[in-house]
Each structure stands twice: as structure tokens, then as C-alpha cells.
Image (cartoon, helix red, strand yellow):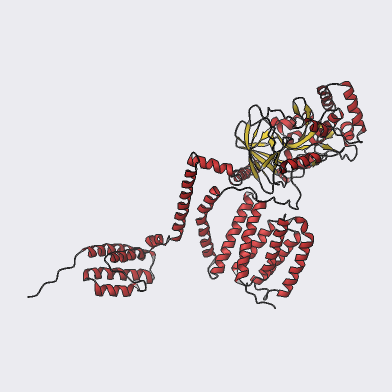
Amino acid sequence: MVRLNPSAYNKAHLLLTLVLCISSFTLTEPLETWILLIVCCATIIRFSLFMNWQKHQISLRTLNLLAILSAIVLATFGWQLGLLLGMLNLLVLASSLKLMLLASRRDYFQLISIQFFLIGTGLVFNQNIAFSLLYGALTMMLLLSLAFHISPVNTWSGQIKRTGKLCLQAVPLCIMLFLVTPKLGPMWQMPVGKGGETGLSDKVTPGDLSQLARSSDLAFRVNFDDDIPVMSERYWRALVLEDFDGKSWQVAPFRERIRQRYQRTNHIFTPRTSGPGIAYQVLSEPSKNPWLFGLDLAVTRDNTIWQGREYQLISRYPLQSGISYRVRSYTQAPLLPDVELLDRRLNLQLPEQGNPRTREWAANLRQRHDSDKAFIGAVSNYFQEQEFRYTLNPSPMPTNAMDQFLFEDRAGFCVHYAGAMAYALRLGGIPARMVTGYLGGEMRGEEYMSVYQYDAHAWVEWLSENGWQRLDPTALVSPLRLEFGLQRAVEYEDSFMQGSALSRLQQLAWVNELRMLLADMDYLWSRWILGFDRDNQEDMLKALLGEVTPLRLALAGAALVLFTALLLAIYQYKHWLVIRHSSPAYYYHKGLRLLERSDIERPRWMGPQDFNSLVQQQQPAHVARQFDKMTRCYLRSSYETRDDAEQQILKKRMRFLLAKLKKALKKKPPAKRQGF
């Protein structure tokens, strides 16, 4: 059966179609590509129906066949997405198919409800200010679609004005709910999307971080409460890599199993701190990974963050969206091993073969230097005395990478230097490991610091009698990297963000200023909107209520309920304000209330003219005369076409007649003469 076209020039259906199309394409990462193609087909079909190019909707048989084929494909290839992403793909697919056959009111309202849900889902995956504004506009379009569905003959300008007014009325309630609604933790763990991971990885091969150095994507921002550390002390710890196979460094599988076991049993690690602390707030960008960032030694009270025994901060959930957390770092506190025997065993492991020249070189150095510090000094001197270069364009090192780097190329990125140093220390019998994270950060005055992907860095930690000690071999070769950042360190070869148009545009003053302005806006959004958490709520309550007690919380809750009721009352019963300020009807109704006080009440079914006749029959002449004038003036203002000037004249006359009626009601009727 082929149905007629109910969507020809239907503005409500057109707006609904646009919302489904736009919201689906903002979810390109969790949605399958073929489902987005079906969304495009549904959009084209619906637009053709709107323009009346296509006179009939597609047949129900065709739609059912397409639905069966799509369900088979999704069930066959979508199982690897996981339950939540699979259900999201199924929901978008069903919406697209339903849109192709949109005909009844029930179909329309079902799709409207689903679109509101999809917009909320989009805010889970995209929370920056640009996407938030886009989703706000899509919500407005859905409300506008509802308005056209209810009143299809209204004009665009009238419906937009009406919808915008309703949205503005809802803003105070939205702000209040945002401030007072309890901030709950995630109910479930979001799955990792099908897109590639961003930022650091738990497995690093020489050259990996040099790819990040060509990216200007934001990694995280920091807002310091105390003094800001200097550039060379901003080592933002993220991952500890202890397993080395001769080419790549990665998180030790045994260490990862221990961490998961501790998390299941809630065995919490509490580092021993000492010395002064640096307090700050971190606003991390979504990375789809659980690791977070902090200066050594970093501790936090956030129960959604796990404190690793390698002094890492790890989120209990992958960062599908941005996260805000507060940290205090004790930069003078030693990084003591949790289980020293385990740390030594893991960080002395070596591959069985490979890199023979490096093995021989390290053995000769160890024979000449008995103490650990002397051996480390000898390795460091080798980096300083030889002509090593810091570069973002190292040569490929497919086999025996350490030999080629140390004795042939002598050119590489931070991972090359950190990997070679850690490997050499292990060959010398010193427990050593690679740590990856970020170094430095761009300050925006004294307000906040932005750390970008090109600030990615790697360094070494070796185990001494006083705990783990940081050793950065990059500082031996390129001190500019520590003091002034990556751009100055590779300025000689012009490889910073090579191939990026942004690097050339930033040389223009106004472009750089615009970039910083947009960064400021994004920072404020991230800190005050996305970063508004339970701690912020508690601080707000303490500032408003002082000591937070059950009684004060109850009173504050009652005040919020009353405030909400007052707003709703104003929105619901605002018509009396319009009558008072824009129509003489206000004074007419005042006159009716004056008559009611004198036991002269107008029945609800009776019109103004009939009630006036009743008053003329039953009331004294001095009262009836004034009310008759008021009624005639009211009818003229209500049912005759008058411009604004005449309305103002009638309004003044109604005010005058109301005063006369009030005096007439107070005046006693003249006494009747008695005849003889």
C-alpha cells in the first residue's frame, strides 16, 4: 500500500527531519557509516515530500524489507560495538526508517521524543561550547516543530517569537536546576568508541610522541591556587612504562593485573607526603583513556580517581567527556616504592637479545664505575659529549634501534633519549623505567595554563635508596626544551607542527589574539559549566548558608520550591499585566469588582451589553448612568478598530469614569418625597 503525501509543505515535519539529520552527524564517531547513509536517504526522501516533488510515500513493503536487511547487518557487524553503542545505532536506524514513513500524529510525537533523547546523548560525546550551542539550537528547532504541528497556519516570525519567549522563560528554572541538582557519578562505564585514541598511549615506540608533537589539540588546562611552578618543573605525570621488548615500552601486564585486583577489592593506596603542597584544578579533555595528569607527587580526594602505586592518577572510567578534578602536589616528597622487591624485579627485566653494541658499551661502563651514581654520570656524559641532536624527524630504526640511535644517528625525540637511558641503566643493574606525560604548558597571564598534545614528553625514573628519582636525558641534549618549550627546541629545523596551517597563521598577531580569546571562552565554559561538580556545590552552599545543617538545607529547599512556584505563577497568570498596561478592559473589570462589593454580580454567561441593561433596570440612576458610560467606552475600545492614539484617549476616559462610578456607589440615593 502506498500512502498519500501528508508532508507537502509541512513545516513541522521539515524541522524534525533537519534535527534528526544534524544530530546524527554530530555522532559520527559512535555511529556506523552505513547508518549515517540511511539517515541521508531519509532526509532526501522527506525533503522531496516537503517540496511535493514526490507525491507518495514509499510503500510499507519496501520499508519493511529495508528494516529487516538493516537489522541483519547491525546484528552481524554491530555486536563488537557493545550494548550501549549498539542500542544507540539501533535507535538512530529506527528513527530514520520511521521518518521515511512519517504520517500519523503518533509517529510524529514518537520521533520528537527520540530526538530530545539523541540531543542528550550528543552532549555525552561532545561537551565543548560550540556543540553545546548547536544542541541548544536543535532543541529550539524541535520546540518550533511542535509549535508548527499545533498551529500550522502561523507564520515563521510569529512561531519563532513565541518559541523564543517560552525558552527565555525557562532559563531561570534551568539555571536553578543546574545549581541545585545533585551531581551524581556515572551509573555505568561508557564503552570506548570505534575512533582512534587521542593523546598518549600505554605502548610507546620511538617516534610515537613525535607524531603528537605535530598536533595542536588541547590535552588539558590547569588553574593554580598557589604559585605557578617554573617551566622546567612542570612534569605532568601520566603513564609509567616498565615492560621493554627491545623496541617498545609499555605498561607491564603484571602491574596492570595487580591494579585491577586492587580496584576490585577497593584496596586504596595512600602516598606518604611531606613538604609544601601546590593546589590546582585540572580540566582534562576527553581522550577515551583512563589516565589523568598531575605533578609529582599528586594526591586527590576525588573518589572517582584511583591513586596508582606508581604514583599515577587513573580515572575509574574512560574519559568519554571532559573531567574536572582538584589535585595537591608535593614536589619535595620522595616517590617511595610500594613493594621494593617487585619494583626492582619489574624494572631490571631485559630482552634476551638485540642491540649488542649497547650491551657491550654498558658493560664496559659498569666495569669502570662501581657506584650507581657514577655509572649514571658516565651515561649522561656520553649524551653530552657526543654530537646528539634533538629532532622531530628521526630516521627509521627497524632493528636494533638502541644501537642505531646511540652510535650511528645520534638524533631523536624525547622517547629515543628516555628509552636509551632507561635501557642503559637496566644493563648496568639499576632499576629504571620510562614515564610519559607532558612537559611545560602555555600560560594565559596568571589565569590558567593550557597544555597541548605537542607538549607530550618522556623521561626516566631510577630507583635509589631514597626512592624513585627523575632523570631527563632530554635536558642533557636540549636544555631549550625544558626552559622554553618544544617550539624553541626545534626552531633550527623548522619542524614544529610541520605541515599545519595553524603554525603559519599564528605568526599573525590578530590570529593569535583570536585564538587566545577562543581559548579563554573555552576555559570559562570548561571550568564553570563542565567543571561544576559536587565540591563546587558544597562551596556554593557554604557561601550562601554558612554552616551547612539539615535545618538550613530544609529551609533552602523550601525557599527554592517557593521561588519556582512564584516563577510558574508569573508565567501562568501574566495576562493581568497585559490587561493593565495595554487595554481599557482593566478599568472595566475594576468597575465590575466595585459592583460586586455592592452585591451587584454579573453572571458568567452574561455579556457586557446585557449586564448593562440589567444594571439600568435595578440600580439608582446616578449609578446606572456612570456604568452605562463605562460599558459604551469599553465596547468601543474592544470591538471597534482604533489606532494607538484613540486607545490612549479611551483608556484615560475609562480611568475617569471608574472614579465617577466609585463616588456614585458611595453616594446615598436621594430620598423620595412623601405625598399628603
Where residue 315 appears, as percent x and y from the top left, is 69, 43
Determine which quarter of the picture holds residue 274. top right
Determine whether 140 is above or below 408 in the image. Answer: below
Where residue 379 appears, as percent x and y from the top left, is 84, 26
Determine whether 104 is above or below 466 in the image. Answer: below
Determine which quarter of the picture holds residue 74. bottom right
Q: Residue furthest left?
A: 676
Report the quarter where the N terminus lies.
bottom right
In the displayed structure, does residue 476 sit left or right of residue 117? Answer: right
Where residue 586 appears, as percent x and y from the top left, is 35, 63
In the displayed structure, does residue 253 sit left or right of residue 609? Answer: right
In the displayed structure, does residue 531 sit left or right of residue 379? Answer: left
Residue 490 seen from this side: no
Of 28 and 318, the residue lying toward us: 318
Of 79 and 425, the residue lying toward us: 79
Report the quarter where the C terminus lies.
bottom left
Where residue 171 appears, as percent x and y from the top left, is 52, 53
Determine whether 649 is above or below 217 in the image. Answer: below
Q: Residue furthest front?
A: 265
In the displayed structure, does residue 378 sit left or right of residue 597? Answer: right
